[in-house]
Image (cartoon, rainbow, N blue to C red):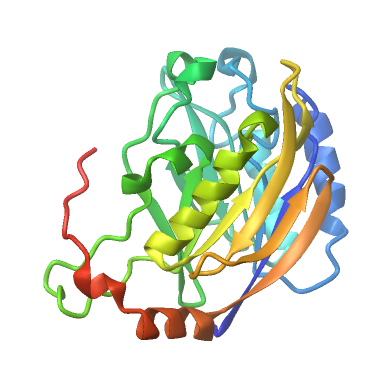
């Protein structure tokens, strides 16, 4: 596909209330009138950023994953966002990449947010997920991962150092990022776009959570040069952005910085 249509949903979340959140998101997704290929929800979209996985976690056979399958099939688009998943004795902040045919990939948040004690309740992931849709390659990450550029860094092909091909075209972050650190959020999203020569999409929530922490949203779509294509602050909003492959190719062709990049091995 020459163009990727990507819809972001910036919304308030009902604190630790899965039924209310799924009902609310059901209405919002159904309200999307235009064609879209991917719909992106915030981090822990069914509960808010809760440290009570023992009470709120589901399995991959649970109601929220089933709901994602149903909505993806109904709207004939990919649906993605993170939720609390239990496997064995471990809990994960897991992003699901749900396809309309019911198949899916998933990514477990690598960097647990220690300031909130996330590392005390959730197990960190150790594997990146780069999904594909219509020839577009998409790197999927979660909130605090944004602060760690090595985890998002494009890796050069070991046998193609002179003409390196980037691993991915779009980098997506789903988040519950507080307003008091919104400057870091906005700055780092632009930095990831510039250094990786990719589109970057950040989808954040708005409103107060159950701990009284306010979120201003500031969901953004940024082009490979770091220019902001879309930015929404303080309010609930649904937006569809068209990503153009030609602008990606032109940036990488006219500014072939990858030829001067450093090879590295990512250790987990």
Residue 110 at what x, y percent from top left? 39, 35
Residue at position x 31%, y 78% in the image: 256
Q: Is residue 139 visible?
A: no
Residue 116 at what x, y percent from top left? 54, 17
Q: Quadrant of residue 260?
A: bottom left
What is the tally of numbered marks visible in this picture? Answer: 0
- Seen from the viewer's position, the closer of residues 238 and 88 is 238
Q: Residue furthest left?
A: 159
Q: Is residue 72 above or below residue 214?
A: below
Q: With 68 as the anchor, is 201 left or right in this view?
A: left
Residue 80 at what x, y percent from top left? 60, 51
- Seen from the viewer's position, the closer of residues 115 and 76 is 115
Q: With 196 as the anchor, is 244 left or right in this view?
A: right
Q: With 199 as the anchor, is 202 left or right in this view?
A: right
Residue 255 at what x, y percent from top left? 36, 79
Q: Is residue 154 above or below residue 125?
A: below
Q: Is residue 21 above or below residue 230?
A: above
Q: Quadrant of residue 58?
A: top right
Q: Is residue 220 visible?
A: yes
Residue at position x 64%, y 38% in the image: 182
Residue at position x 26%, y 60% in the image: 155
Residue at position x 45%, y 69% in the image: 169
């Amino acid at each position: 596909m020459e163009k990727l249509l990507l819809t972001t949903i910036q919304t308030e979340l009902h604190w630790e209330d899965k039924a209310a959140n799924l009902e609310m998101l059901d209405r919002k997704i159904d309200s999307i009138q235009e064609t879209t290929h991917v719909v992106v929800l915030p981090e822990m979209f069914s509960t808010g950023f809760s440290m009570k996985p023992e009470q709120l976690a589901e399995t991959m056979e649970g109601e929220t994953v089933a709901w994602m399958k149903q909505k993806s099939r109904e709207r004939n688009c990919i649906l993605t966002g993170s939720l609390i998943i239990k496997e064995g004795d471990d809990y994960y902040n897991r992003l699901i990449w749900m396809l309309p045919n019911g198949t899916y990939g998933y990514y477990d948040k690598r960097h647990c947010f220690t300031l909130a004690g996330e590392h005390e309740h959730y197990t960190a992931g150790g594997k990146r997920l780069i999904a594909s849709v219509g020839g577009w390659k998409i790197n999927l990450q979660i909130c605090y991962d944004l602060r760690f550029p090595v985890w998002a860094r494009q890796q050069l092909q070991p046998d193609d150092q002179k003409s390196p091909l980037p691993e991915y075209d779009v980098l997506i972050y789903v988040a519950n990022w507080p307003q008091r650190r919104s400057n870091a959020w906005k700055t780092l999203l632009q930095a990831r776009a510039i250094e990786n020569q990719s589109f970057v999409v950040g989808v954040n929530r708005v409103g107060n959570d159950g701990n009284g922490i306010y979120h201003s949203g500031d969901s953004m779509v940024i082009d490979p040069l770091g220019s902001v294509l879309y930015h929404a602050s303080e309010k609930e909003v649904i937006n569809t952005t068209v990503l153009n492959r030609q602008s990606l190719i032109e940036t990488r062709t006219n500014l072939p910085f990858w030829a001067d990049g450093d090879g590295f091995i990512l250790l987990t």
